[in-house]
Structure formats: structure tokens, C-alpha cells
Amino acid sequence: MPQFTYEAKTRGGELRTGVLDADDENAVGAKLRAQQLTPVKVSKKGFNISFGGGSVSTKDLVIFTRQFATMIDAGLPLVQCLDILSTQNDNPYFAKVLRQVKNDVEGGNTFSESLGKHPAVFDSLFCNLIRAGEIGGILDTILQRLAAYIEKNDKLARQVKSAMTYPVGVAILAVGVVGIMMVFVIPQFEAMFREFGGSLPALTQGVIDLSHFVVTNLFIIIGGAVGTFFGLRALIRSEKGAIAKDKLLLQVPVLGSTLRKIAVARFTRTLGTLLSSGVPILDALDIVARSAGNWVIEQGIQGARAKIAEGKNMAEPLGEANVFPPMVIQMISVGEQTGALDTMLNKIADFYEDEVDQAVAALTSLLEPLLMVFIGGSVGTMIIAMYLPIFSMAGNIKAE
């Protein structure tokens, strides 16, 4: 689905910036109005390609945030901090962005407004936390919290990515091995069997017929696979396709429960960080919903947010959304009653991040034997099929 950057105003006249996924500009406008925002400017986000370094890594962002916090805490003026950090930054693209931010601040914009003009680098969560730090006069503390949050969120993402890298790699290897055997190895055996004459065992004949089909239709199969890949990708990027994918993933055994735990960890960590930094609860829930990464969970949070706006507490609407486990809802309820909701959310996040570690390890340990069985079964079946006629001929020679 295409991404659009936007500028919009709240009812109080405050300028908001960010990025939304939508089919077109009209859909962006509808989403903004649903959030009680008035669109000011909407533009399609282009490809972030630059041969001189056109992106900012998580590591770059964490280093910038921590260094900035140290400088602010030491009493350096904001503009001087930006000047120093832009000069010493090794990433040319990031240095350019920081210079633009510095110029905007010198031009009279607030720091958060200046950051908001670069949504590809500083997302809505980052800008809203900075805004809260500016209002509360605790910018250095907010920056330290931001750095810690980004690091933990990145760790969570890397855990999931590393867990899936091995199974995907093994699956690609398995398909490659089977393909090579079908195209190059089995035809060699077939030529040898043809010289010997006689009928072949059913399993051997079946594998040879399958090899014929693959060789004859090789380009069609490759084209079909490539077409299917891009077709599915286009479908998933559409709004209806993305919704169907998100619903389906949560229903998959083992994987669905793992994704829910990841969502809980991300939701509680992000919301806890926002609330402890002084961001209003409705704004915080809106930011958390848009960064949920799953349509079902996003809709559940947005539905709860609408009920909270009507005056309800947080725990009850979240429970009615049927998105998060009962234990999480109960702990949130306790946090609300004791007035320590942000602390409770961070404790839940710590617990579920450990749960994600175990869930990802369990998922990997489940996938590994399944992949091994698939590879062993596929390759083993072809080897047995090719050697059955040889064993049969050897038996006939002994009988004679």
C-alpha cells in the first residue's frame, strides 16, 4: 500500500505531521478526519533511494538521541547541539537532515515541529515525545527514554527477523536442491535406465514423469512463481489484502500466539513510554494504534480509544476489544487504580519481551525439524526412486 506524508491541524490549531498507509490522497484525508484532524498538506512518499547514503539506521538514531540528551543535560543551547551533531555525523543523509532541522529551529519553529518535517527519520512517536519534553521542560530525560525505547524496540524486531532467517534460508535451499535434482540429475538416471531396457518401478516412473514435467515447463513454472510472488505482494499491500493477511496470521497455530505476544510487548512498551513522558492518553493511544503493525490490533486499540474518549477507563474497553490477554487487562486495571499505569505498562512490557524470547525460540525449534523432514523426505524419495531399478537388476543377476 502506498505511503503518504501529511500535515494536519488539531481542533486546537496544533500542527501534526506523520506518515499513513492508504490507497490514495482521499483515503488519507478520510483517515485524518476520523482522527479529528484537518488535513493541510498530503503528498505521496517516494522511494527512499540515495547512492550517497539515503537512510538512517536505528543505531544512528540511538547514538544521536543519547548524544543529544547528554549535551542538553550539560546545558548546551539546542541550536549548538544540532550544529555539533550534524558536523560530526558520519551519515551524509542524516547530517543533511540535522542541518535542515537546525535551520528550521533558527527560523522560529519548535524543535518537535522541525523534526516533524522529516517523517522518514523521526516518526510521530519520536516527535510527540519531544513535544512533551519541550512542554514539560524535561527534554534531556525524554531523549534518554527515547533512546532506551528505540533500542528495546529494535531488539524485539531483530529477534523476530533472526528467528525467521534460518527457516527461510533452509526452505530456499531445499527448493534449490530439489530443482537441481529434477532438472539435471534425474534425466541422467533416466538415460541410463533407457539403455538397460525393461519396465521401471512405479515410484521411479513417477519421479521421472515429474522431472519431465518440470524440465518441459521450467520457464512457465519460474514465471508462475515470480508472478505469484509479486501478485501476493500487491494483494497484501492493498487495504483488503492487508486486513485479510493480518486476520489470518493471528489464527495460525504457534505463530499467531507469538505475534500476539510481540504486539502486547510493543503496545505496552510504547504506551508506557508515552504516558511516562506526559503525552495525553488519547494522543498516546492513537500513536500506539498506528504503530501496532497489525490491522486487527490497530482497530481494537482505536475502538478502545473511542470509548475512553467518552469517559470510560482504559482496562474495560481494551478487554472488550478481545485483542490482549486477560492478564494484561487486569494489570492495566490495577495500574489505573493505583495511579501507576506507566510503571505497570513497563513491567508488562518487560515480562512479555521475555515471553517473546521463549516464543520465538519455540517457533524456531518447531520449524527446524519440519524443514529437515521436508528436505530429507523430498531428497530421500528421489534417491530411493533412482536406486530401486538398480537394486532390482542386481537381484535378477544373483538369481541367474
Image: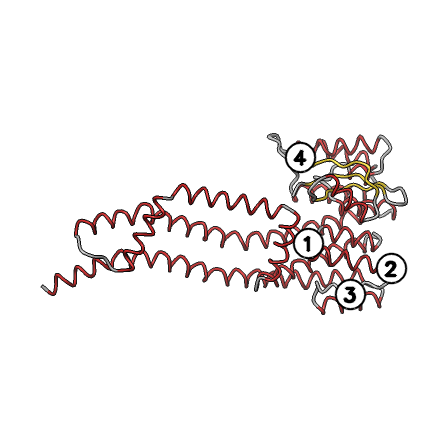
In primary-sequence order, the first of circles 4 and 2 is 4
Q: Secondary structure under badge 4? A: loop
Does the CB distance between marks 3 and 1 fall below 8 Å? no
Q: Marks 4 and 2, how far apart in space?
A: 38 Å
Structural crowding at the residue carrying mark 1, measured as other residues with C-alpha within 10 Å and reported as few (<14), some (14–19) or many (≥20): some
In primary-sequence order, the first of circles 3 and 2 is 2
Amino acid of disc 3: Ile
Residue at 46%, 61% in the rendered image: 370
Q: Marks 3 and 1, how far apart in space?
A: 22 Å
> In the figure, residue 202 lies in which quadrant?
bottom left
In primary-sequence order, the first of circles 3 and 4 is 4
Q: Secondary structure under badge 1? A: helix
In primary-sequence order, the first of circles 2 and 1 is 1
Q: Nearer the viewer, residue 359 or 373?
A: 373
Provide the residue designation for mark 3: 332
Structural crowding at the residue carrying mark 2, measured as other residues with C-alpha within 10 Å and reported as few (<14), some (14–19) or many (≥20): few
Of tags 3 and 2, the one toward the viewer is 2
Amino acid of disc 1: Trp
Of tags 3 and 4, the one toward the viewer is 4
Q: Position of residue 253 (x, y in %)?
A: 57, 64
In primary-sequence order, the first of circles 3 and 1 is 1
Numbered label attached to residue 46: 4
Amino acid of disc 4: Gly
Q: Marks 3 and 2, how far apart in space?
A: 19 Å
Provide the residue designation for mark 1: 295
Q: Quadrant of the C terminus?
A: bottom left
Q: Marks 3 and 4, how far apart in space?
A: 40 Å
Left or right: where 398 falls relative to 114: left
Q: Secondary structure under badge 3? A: helix
Structural crowding at the residue carrying mark 3, measured as other residues with C-alpha within 10 Å and reported as few (<14), some (14–19) or many (≥20): many
Provide the residue designation for mark 2: 310
